[in-house]
Image: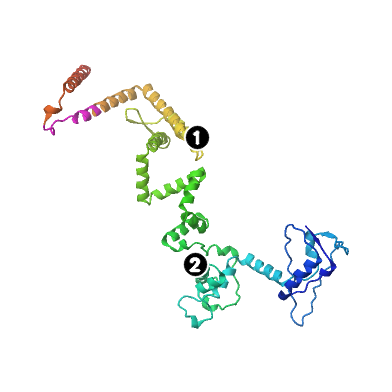
Amino acid sequence: MTVAIDSSAAAVPSGEDNVPAAAEAAETAGAVEAGPAVPPVPAPAAPAAGEENFWQPEAPAAAPAADASGAEVEVGEEAEDVPGEVPEAIVRDAREFGGYARTGGWTFALKVARSVRPGGQAAGETEKVSARRFAALAECSADRVMRFYKTWDRAADDGLVPQFEALAPGVEVELPDADVWLSYYVSRSSATSVRGQAITEAAEAEGIRPTKALEVAENPTALRAAILADPGTAEAARKALMDRLGEDPVLRSGLARDIVRADELKKAVAEEAKTGGQLEYVRKIAEEGQVKTAAGQKIEASPALREEAERHLSLIDELEEDEEAGEWAREAYDTVRNLVAETVEKDPELRVQERRAKFYSSISKATKAFEELTFDDVAEIDDIVEDDMVRRLEELQQAIAACLTALQKAHPAS
């Protein structure tokens, strides 16, 4: 940025009352070209009365050239070395900015704490004003004022800042660092409710600012939009719901109803249940060293079988969270099932036990099914009986008779 400089504007009188004069002098000197603002440099504090002023501005190493016509001079980092006093308004702004940079919101909390009278204190007891009156003077809401007031109150309870009674309008005290401000200040009024306090505690446990969590909780439509639009947000919401299921029976029942009513969800749940069962089958082989055969008998897994199960599990455990384990689980399940079948076929004793177990399993299923065919509770049996029923029962009777004959021939009674 370039600035046109005239010798008539070499010095501007200091003091707040001379700000208009400074503006007039700048206007007389020439026009300032538009460009990015250059931050002002505060002048050093004036020496106390009777104290010699040892500070003298140093002359710039290379003074910018300027002629009577007001030639343009480049202004960059060298602008810091330009001599002359800075207007008091700029000095005040710079000092207030520096104070806020060091203390953050504590700067404004102090203004509230020393100006707003505590609750229960009558107006005649102090020159302080009510929060509503202070808010009217500040042209903001009383709720905003009270949030700063309550922040100071919490910090005072912890001994971080003085109590309200120790403060008077205009008094200055040492303020905490700006980094401490966020741990006390809550910018949303919902944080004072039971629900807000729970959200605040959960946010602090997660290591995030409570204000962000409270803002999300107050805008469910915005949360819905983020979930619908962003897979990452949807995944975070899913994990949060799963973490909450154990302690929220209402949410658990609601999700169950939603799953039952949605065909696609029911299919997905059934598929995941199948995958989970397959993984559990493989995991038990690897961890417990036992395996269940096709007929349902438990046998000891061979070292080779356990090693194969562990190999497949290690591949599945290395999958990323967003990777589907279904195909890997099916492959692991099929592999170990085939190995189990081979193990049974290679061992004559196991093979006999397996077939015996399978036969008993079939008898148990047939017995259970036939026991359900009772007519004791049917008042009008003639109305439900059909010819096909009688025929099929006769065929079943013949099959049972043939089975008994084969068994009796193989193992005659002693």
Q: Quadrant of the C terminus?
A: top left
Q: Residue furthest right?
A: 67
Nearer-N-terminus badge (1/2): 2
Residue stretch in magenta: 365-379
Q: Amino acid at mark 2?
A: Asp
Quadrant position of residue 280? top left
Say above or below: 181 vs 331: below
Quadrant position of residue 271? top left
Say above or below: 205 vs 167: above
Q: Quadrant of the N terminus?
A: bottom right
On the picture, is 252 further left or further right than 109?
left
Q: Amino acid at mark 1?
A: Leu
Find residue 332 and report its horizontal and vertical position in percent: 44, 31
Q: Which mark is residue 143?
A: 2
On the image, numbered disc 1 is attached to which residue?
A: 315
Say above or below: 132 vs 244: below
Residue 303 visible, this orientation: no
Find residue 304 and report its horizontal and vertical position in percent: 45, 29
Given residues 121 and 10, the one toward you in this image is 10
The mark total stands at 2
Disc 2 is placed on an element classified as helix
